Amino acid sequence: MGYKRKALILNKDDFHKTLRRIAHQIIEGVPQVSKICLIGIQRRGVNLAYRLKRIIDSLEKVDIPLGTIDITLYRDDLTAIGPNPEVRSTKIDFALDGKIVILVDDVLFTGRSARAALDALMDFGRPEAVKLVVLVDRGHRQLPIRADFIGKNIPTSLQEEVAVKVEEIDGKDEVVIWEKD
Amino acid sequence: MWQRRHLLGLKDLDKKDIELILGQAEYFREIPRRQIKKVPSLRGKTVVNLFFEPSTRTRISFELAAKRLSADVINFSSSASSIQKGESILDTLKNMEAYAVDIFVIRHSFSAASVYLAQRTKACVVNAGDGANEHPTQALLDMFTVKQRLKKLTGLKVVVVGDIAYSRVARSNIWGFSHMGCEVWLCAPPTLLGRDFSALPVRITYDLRKAVKEADVIIMLRLQNERQSEKLIPSLREYRQHFGLNPDILKGARRDAVIMHPGPVNWDVEIASSLKEKIMPSILNQASNGLAVRMAVLYLLKGAAE
Amino acid sequence: MKILIKGATLVHHDRTEKKDILVKDSTIAKVSKKISSQEADEVIRASGKFVFAGFIDMHTHLRTPGREDEETLLSGALAAAKGGFTTILCMPNTTPPIDNYEIAFWIRKVSQNIGIVDIYPVGTITKERKGKELAEFGYLKEAGCLAVSDDGDPVASSLLLRRALEYAKMYNLLLISHAEEKSLAAGVMLESDISAKWGMPAIAEVAESVAVAREIELAYFTASRLHLAHISRRRSLRLIECAKKDKIGISCETCPHYFSLSVKDIERNNFHANFKVNPPLGTEDDKQAIRKALKSGVIDCIATDHAPHSFLEKEKSFQEASFGMIGLEFAFSLSYQLVKEKVLSLEVIADRLSYRPAKILGLEERGEIREGLRADLVIVDLEKEWVVDKESIVSRSKNTPFLGRKLPGVVEYTISGGKIVYKK
């Protein structure tokens, strides 16, 4: 069974506009910019966090700390028989205590990744608050989790896949919906 | 992707497998630096360290690796056990298995004991040293250290010196480094080398100066004092003279050569104590690298355990 | 009681022929072109089948007394009968060892009472097999021993072995030597690329040939009869061939596993302890040399070195398990396999399994199908094949590397001393 492309949700321009809008919303929503740090969830959340940092840094003339987090070791959905997914880099080389952590992911779906990311973050220290940024919220939550900043809400069916592509990994910035064939 | 159920040795792994383990180990190095040095990846899993031969360092390393992954760990050592009452190693394993063990970490003084037990259990098995056969995680950590220092693992000249015939560390390193495309040299008196090593992918010399020349990696093995009784060499003095690493011999190696030793070192026998300051950091580094490598191995095998 | 075997092909050590055999009581009464069924009480219709003189195994371990859980005289005799053997020699490495008249006599008498196949105890060379003082060869002979051996603990002192050879000559006892230089044999498998690869303690190839050389020299020097057990190495065969040319009074045996398996099979079978045996399985080169020597006659006979071990002794890792494998029930099929592979002829099989062992042991009434000799006969179907499985093994122990293997040639009848002792 394969997937076929159903619709283009964000093209390159929309993608960039959306990121800029989110950056503005963060600055507006978190007045103490000095307390902000960005942490991207592996893999594409890392690239999105870096983009947001560049925008916020230039708008506010600051250098926001940026980290990456891999949630593989915290996942609760690895019970299926089969090899474990590969672990990727976690790098948070600043203290989290008292910080307002902006956690960045590409898609919010069941909420399990965000749950795992929160667990992982807590092992690094005690932030003052954690806010969640996602480029796409596609619904179907299984846990009581919501995002604070959302690029685009896309109602989807479970037959569909939302693919966020970024220049650094996929060669282009766009969001596409695929449908099971 | 890791598909194997056991890690019994490096002889039957390939380059990809080794690269995967070492690549994964890289990411596990960061965990002990966290405020909470623990991840929940093996939560609810049971790891049994089944040690039929005394060992402190390897056992501690595996125990800590499993605990940092949140597994429940049980340590079994034969000195405090029913083995002395005549229970076979298979019975011991089977009795433990009844507690729904997921991973056995096995150390035994008999060669290929890990192969024997792995074939008879549903759990995963990690070989923590069996006789003179293999000690795969030790070699993996050696390779990890080399990769860290030299930024590469292929095309290196690797020299293994000393009590090779009886060394599982030597064997695992021979397999591991040759799978990675290194040129492996063995250097030892014939009595410590055995006759049939030429069948392995190695080059052999009795001349340490020649072996060390242009070497990138020098692995010095521990001269087992107990073996002295077998009169494999006439004296430690003569051994030191011809097979001991000293500053003069070391000049022939590459400047950035990595010197390793599975420890504990017999200073002034296999390595001159004047090299202590130069070598100790890489020996101590083994502890933290060993932990990362063992965490990676346990994590990868856990996928196969489910 | 008269038994007629009708229509079979008789395999002699030097020819085959189609003849009928009439057995009367314990002897072969008549061998002739056509014998009428009326002459017999029982007729075995055997057209298409082959008849050999009952096989003689110069080397078995029956574990009695001491380890009757592994084998008894009865279970050993049944296993022998199933394998086509009608005469077997059992080694003295028992607990206590067969080093005196009483134990030897007891084994001989009990096995005669059982009466399935003929079992001859082999006495020890030295008391308690300790290699210090000679055992009482005279009494051992009187109790029924044909040979003496210290089995797996060969006499280390060359002086004592000289004395043993000299003393044995007086009683016409055959000295059987397990030729092994122990100091070169502190291992569990052949010293080879495979032992190096797996870090296994290894037995040097020359551990056997070094000892063979000594035995040959002492046999020459004492002009005594010496039989070399379970020869397994090419180097040993070179020495034996040379000694035979010099007319030194030696003979030797090999075992089916040395011409059927090699050290590679150990690795292929993940170091299963059933492949652990001493002398250890050799190289492919050794295997070929053994086959060649069997054909040429440098090797006189095929013996089994049947070594039963309990489940526990073998359900261990390779390094700690016991040495040895059972062989009585497979020896013929494994030998016949060499005929199928065109290495040996049927006549050579008859020679190595019956004719020559009888000659070496001085059993004048056995080893041939001839009128007037003891009626020890085995009827085989060479067309059939069978699969070795645990349930079918008659021996009390099941330790064989051939489990699951399909083997050619099935023993249909074994007649020992005129009685049908095995019938498929």
Image (cartoon, rainbow, N blue to C red):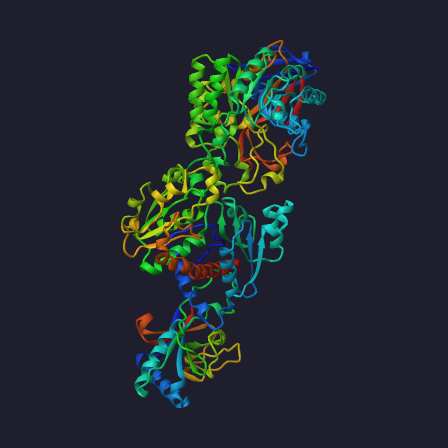
Which is nearer the eye, C92 or C13? C92
Which residue is located at x 38 percent, y 42 percent? B237
- Residue B8 position within the rendered picture, expressed as x and y whole percent measured from the top left: 47, 50
Q: Is residue B142 above or below residue C135?
A: below
Relative to B250, B131 lies left or right? right
Tell me where residue C370 sits by quadrant: top right
Image coords of residue C326 (percent x, y): 58, 31
- When the figure is inspected, residue B186 is found, relative to residue C294, above or below; the finding is below
Instruction: Tell me if C307 is positioned left or right of A95 in this view.
Output: right
Q: Residue at x 37, y 44 (%)?
A: B240
Residue B199 position (above or below residue C295): below
Task: Tell me the quadrant of the picture where the N terminus of chain C can be found.
Answer: top right
Q: Residue B50: horizontal and vertical position, in percent?
A: 56, 53
Residue at image position (34%, 77%) is A50
Between A61 and B120, the one nearer to me in the picture: A61
Instruction: Locate residue A26, reporting x and y percent.
Output: 39, 86
Q: Is residue C3 left or right of residue B269?
A: right
Answer whether residue C253 is visible to the viewer in this image: yes
Considering depth in this image, is C265 or C148 the residue closer to the camera? C148
Tell me if residue B11 can be seen.
Answer: no
In which quarter of the view is residue A5 placed? bottom left
Near-viewer residue (A120 or C357): A120
Q: How many marks?
A: 0
State the quadrant of the C terminus of chain C.
top right
